[in-house]
Amino acid sequence: MPKIFIAFFLFNTILFNAIYLPDSPLAKKEREKLWPIITKERIEKGLKANSPIYIRVFKLENQLELWVKSGNKFVLFHTYNICSYSGGLGTKVREGGGKSPEGFYEITPTQLNPVSHYYLAINIGYPNKLETAKGYTGNAIMIHGDCVSIGCYAMTNEGIAQIYTQVYMALKNGQHKINLDIFPFRMNEQNMDAYKDDPSIEFWKTLKKGYDLFNQKLIPTDAEVKHNEYYFKD
């Protein structure tokens, strides 16, 4: 194989495998301040600083949980309060509907927005494969700061700085994607029974399958799409 071809191949392989992470002076400043603190806290809890993470959101409880991998499972590292989301329970189906989405999403490097008007922001990836198949409309749905929201999940600036920093570092340390699961509430039997007459109940039953799988295994499960519903491989 000619040397020039080998060099070209190696260059493109490196370029393809390189991870581009958007950055800004603000994001860098917060990272340099927070990452040593977060690292120390993880080590004190018996966790590795560079371990993969998982995020899940509960609307009714106004909580965002950040989990960290420990061994073959994930453990809850921190719970952040959500300032606001819009539209109450039930998922987003159209642009301008004022709803915040519910479902199973993935965060990749290109979804980071370090120059957001709302301090720092992470695009959740709406619409996902199921929402696209169903023809749902809308875009640029974020987890961001500034405590105000129309369709997004708004955190305090302090909260989003911590979340953003951990997402950035997980991706920088080699995690290819971060599972983000958004639920209307903790999907226990009590809540499912309390909302059994809600128009969204059949959709929520499909979310509960993913919720239950994580609770059983403590490992994030990729949601696939089958017959216009979420489908999970056990």
Image (cartoon, rainbow, N blue to C red):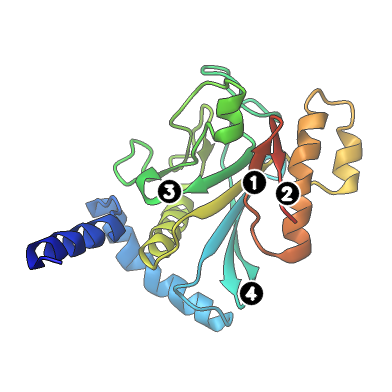
Residue to which mark 2 is pinned: 210
Question: In the figure, is residue 46 to the left or right of 206?
Answer: left
Which one is earlier in the sequence, the residue at label 3 or at label 1?
A: 3
Which one is earlier in the sequence, the residue at label 2 or at label 4?
A: 4
Question: In the figure, is residue 189 to the left or right of 63?
Answer: right
Of the residues tagged 3 and 1, which is closer to the observer?
1
Image point (65%, 38%), residue name? 225
Which one is earlier in the sequence, the residue at label 4 or at label 3?
A: 4
Numbered disc 1: secondary structure: loop
Report, in whole angstroms, how far the alpha carbon at label 1 lies from the one at label 4: 19 Å
Residue to which mark 1 is pinned: 223
Residue to which mark 3 is pinned: 157
Of the residues tagged 4 and 3, which is closer to the observer?
4
Amino acid identity at mark 2: Gly
Across and down, in percent, residue 83 comes to: 56, 41
Which one is earlier in the sequence, the residue at label 1 or at label 2?
A: 2
Q: Are marks 1 and 2 in contact (CB under 8 Å)?
A: yes
Pointer 4: residues within 10 angstroms few (<14), some, or many (20+)? few
Image point (19%, 60%), residue name? 9
